[in-house]
Image (tube, rainbow, N blue to C red):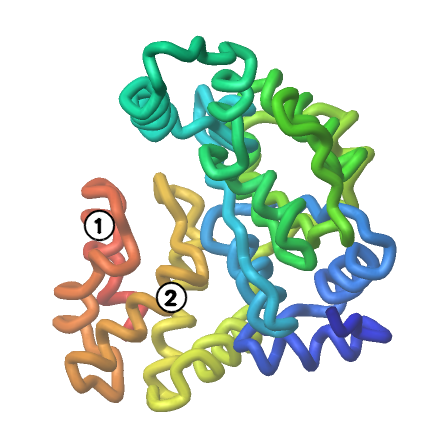
């Protein structure tokens, strides 16, 4: 892949892919690429952690391979599995086509069951095989300690061993981006393996710039009003789920779809479900909209 020569180059490449990175994020992301180290991004939901991995893949025309973590995920679901239905069909085919007068070599049949054609490559194995690629390990904080330890081993060696087939090594290490909403603390061993960055919600001017970049057809006045209200909502401190940039973009798109060039109280109240996803938050925000839009 074409490597950026500086963080400024990376900013330009990400900008062309529709992602605005501030200096701190651009610098740590550049170092991650240059040093071939995984990048661990933490921050509130909706601050652009996942979007950075998507933008890196788009900017450098690489496949994006996503591993969505969840409670109970194990190595088989992240690495590889065997296609048992096809293996059973293969056994039946062997049985049906075997001459009864000639004994079957059991070892040979067993070996044929673990052929490459029956292997189901999961995200991590795909990333090692298809590199250069971007491997997004999304919401690693939702996985358990055992999976975190397994992931650490893979990231340390960029290889995995499949007992039936041998060792798979990445010709070129994949670009690895891990995201966490910090629902739990990650282990120091994993953090030591990664470069780290905490992504804050953008300031008002930057968020307006993000909206205008993603939706240039939207009126400047509308973008400024929406971002201003969202910024106020984040500052309240009493919402169960403060809106992220994703909600800002959703709300702006909804208002634009309704043909609005400005945000008025009635329309804001009617579309607040694009921003707030809890009934309690919607009630609080509706009560406060009149003062926000005064």
Q: Quadrant of residue 125?
A: top right
Image position, residue 167 (x, y; %) = 72, 31
Left or right? Give the position of 7 relative to 246. right
Question: Any mark on residue 282, and which?
Answer: 1
Determine contact: label 1, label 2, CB under 8 Å.
Answer: no
Q: How many marks?
A: 2
Nearer the observer, 113 or 53: 113
The quadrant of the image that shows the C terminus is bottom left
Q: Position of residue 236 (x, y in %)?
A: 42, 51
* Mark earlier in primary sequence (1, 2): 2
Answer with left or right where residue 230 lies relative to residue 57.
left
Within 10 Å of the Cα at label 1, are there few (<14), some (14-19), or many (20+) other Cα atoms?
Answer: some
* Secondary element at image label 2: helix
Judge by depth and name the residue closer to the eye, 173 or 208: 173
> Would you name the residue on which mark 2 appears?
248
Task: Say which residue appears at 57% left-offset and 45% top-offset.
Answer: 126
Q: Residue 21's spot in the image, x, y percent?
A: 65, 69
Vertical order, 139 against 88 (above or below):
below
> In the rendered image, is residue 87 in sight?
yes
The image quadrant of residue 152 is top right
Q: Position of residue 283 (x, y in %)?
A: 19, 48
Residue at horizontal 80 percent and vertical 48 percent from the top: 37
287 w.r.t. 168: above or below? below
Residue found at x 76% / y 74%: 2
Q: CA distance from mark 1 to mark 2?
A: 15 Å
In this view, 275 is above or below 215? above
249 or 237, nearer to the observer = 249
């Amino acid at each position: 892949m074409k490597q950026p020569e500086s963080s400024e180059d990376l900013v330009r490449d990400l900008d062309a892919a529709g992602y605005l990175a501030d200096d701190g994020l651009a610098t740590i992301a550049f170092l991650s690429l240059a040093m071939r180290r995984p990048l661990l991004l933490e921050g509130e939901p909706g601050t652009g952690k996942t979007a950075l991995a998507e933008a890196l893949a788009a900017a450098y025309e690489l496949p994006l391979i996503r591993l969505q973590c969840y409670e109970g995920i194990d190595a088989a679901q992240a690495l590889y599995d065997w296609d048992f239905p096809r293996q059973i069909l293969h056994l039946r085919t062997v049985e049906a086509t075997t001459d009864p007068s000639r004994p079957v070599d059991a070892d040979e049949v067993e070996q044929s069951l673990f052929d490459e054609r029956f292997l189901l490559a999961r995200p991590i194995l795909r990333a090692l095989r298809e590199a250069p690629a971007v491997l997004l390990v999304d919401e690693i904080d939702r996985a358990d300690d055992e999976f975190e330890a397994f992931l650490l081993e893979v990231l340390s060696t960029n290889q995995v061993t499949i007992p039936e087939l041998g060792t798979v090594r990445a010709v070129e290490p994949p670009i690895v981006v891990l995201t966490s909403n910090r629902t739990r603390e990650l282990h120091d061993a994993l953090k030591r393996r990664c470069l780290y960055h905490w992504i804050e919600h953008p300031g008002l001017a930057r968020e307006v710039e993000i909206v205008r970049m993603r939706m240039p057809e939207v009126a400047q006045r509308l973008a400024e009003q929406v971002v201003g209200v969202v910024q106020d909502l984040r500052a309240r401190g009493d919402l169960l789920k403060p809106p992220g940039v994703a909600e800002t973009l959703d709300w702006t798109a909804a208002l634009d779809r309704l043909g609005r060039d400005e945000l008025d109280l009635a329309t804001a109240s009617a579309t607040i479900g694009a921003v707030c996803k809890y009934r309690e938050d919607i009630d609080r925000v509706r009560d406060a909209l009149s003062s926000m839009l005064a």
